[in-house]
Image (cartoon, helix red, strand yellow):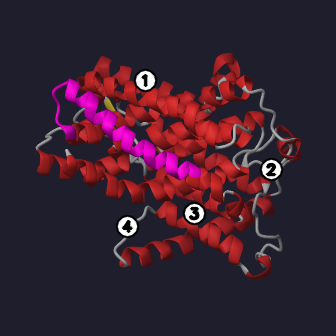
Amino acid sequence: MEYLQGVLRVESFLAVTLGIVVLFVGKRLNERVRFLRELSIPEPVTGGLLFSMVFGLLYAASGLAVEFNLRARDLLLVYFFTTIGINAGFRDLLAGGRPLLILLAITIGFMFVQNLAGISVASLFDLSAAVGVVAGSVSLMGGHGTTIAWAPVIREQYGIANAMEIGIANATFGLILASLMGGPIAKFLIKRHAITPPPQIVDAVQDVGLSEAQKKVGIGHLDFLSAILAIHICIAAGYVLNEVIAGLGLMLPLFVTCLLAGILITNLMPGRLLTLTGTSWPTRTPAIALIADIALGTFLAMSLMSMQLWTLIDLAGPVLAILVTQFLLAVGVTLFILFPLMGRDYDAAVIASGFGGVTLGSTPTAMANMAAVTQHFGPSHQAFIIVPLVSAFFIDLVNALVIPLFLRAF
């Protein structure tokens, strides 16, 4: 740790350690507070929000700001999406074809609605249309990464001096709302429509996390190491793929190319060759599910605990108005458009829980929402295939076209 001019900088090792502590605190709180458990609020969300508020109160009382080195957190994200790729079979991808196209169409349509809503609310505060776009698909669909990339351009070309601050504030509050809405929406849909998960999936292997029965059986150390080896092979291939794509002029996040590498290696490996451990390729194994749960939970806990809430106070008014509008739109589209079009079944309810993460938060938030729901009600392999493909791959590509379209039009 390093203290300099009122800022306490926490290095990567301690940041990961605290992230694990935050995860356990969230777990204990969810165990003790019934409504958190019943609403399937993800454990890292419970702990992460609590710690971010504690750091906010510390800053208010003493002026001490806590900043974290998050390099290790970003590696955890790569691990998580690689496990999703390893779990994706071509048969599942083909089965998800129609639902994938429906989800993609709804998401793209919502992207346009989101920008129009942002522009409309911004105009009520006599703010530029560019501010509405920043508070629309730039910060919500795009998240913090897209905000950081586009804010300097919007500041220079459209004269929005605080474009970065508005975008970061919107992305941060959106992340909080997305983290809290998924579980309650899924529970409402499941109860309202008396949905029962198909009996064949209740005891099936989870995509993220272990069922109670699997926790009792346990995982062998070689199974765990075999899964780690498979993940590392896919990450290495994903890194090479990322470099090749960058050479063609297309920039994609590393976790996206690692996801694609996992899919390709899993499905194209000749005869599903045995690994060096003598075990089969670990698609949909408890070891992969456990690693996915560890990586996703720690990533989200670190993301939420590191939010500097005190930096958002000055922008609370317009940002809050825009976010309330966007939140109501997301809930309405989820309940009345997405869920019916996706088939009104259990998979549709799980996908609905992740839609808030897609539209208001981030891909990891969507996955955490779905993980919390499926660990309570049962797995949904379709949801864990089509949601990351839409949110981690297609959204960035479409958003890169939509953002300049709206900026030029208004």
Binning the other alpha carbons within 10 Å of mark 1 as few (below 14), some (14 to 19) or many (20 upward) gives some
Q: Secondary structure at mark 4?
A: loop
Sequence-earlier tag: 3 or 1: 1
Whole-percent x, y for residue 246 in the image: 38, 73
State which mark lies toward you, 1 or 4: 4
User: Please, what secondary structure does the residue beneath circle 1 have?
Assistant: helix
Secondary structure beneath dot 3 equals: helix
Task: Please tell me whether mark 3 or mark 1 is closer to you in this view.
Answer: 3
**What residue type is disc 1 on?**
Met
In percent of the image, x 72 and y 29: which residue is there? 190
Numbered badge on residue 251:
4
Mark 2–mark 4 Cα distance, whole angstroms, equals 34 Å
Mark 2 vs 1, N-terminal side: 1
Please report whichever mark, 1 or 4, sits nearer to the chain's N-terminal start: 1
- Identify the residue position indicated by label 2 in the image: 205
- The region drawn magenta spans 102-129
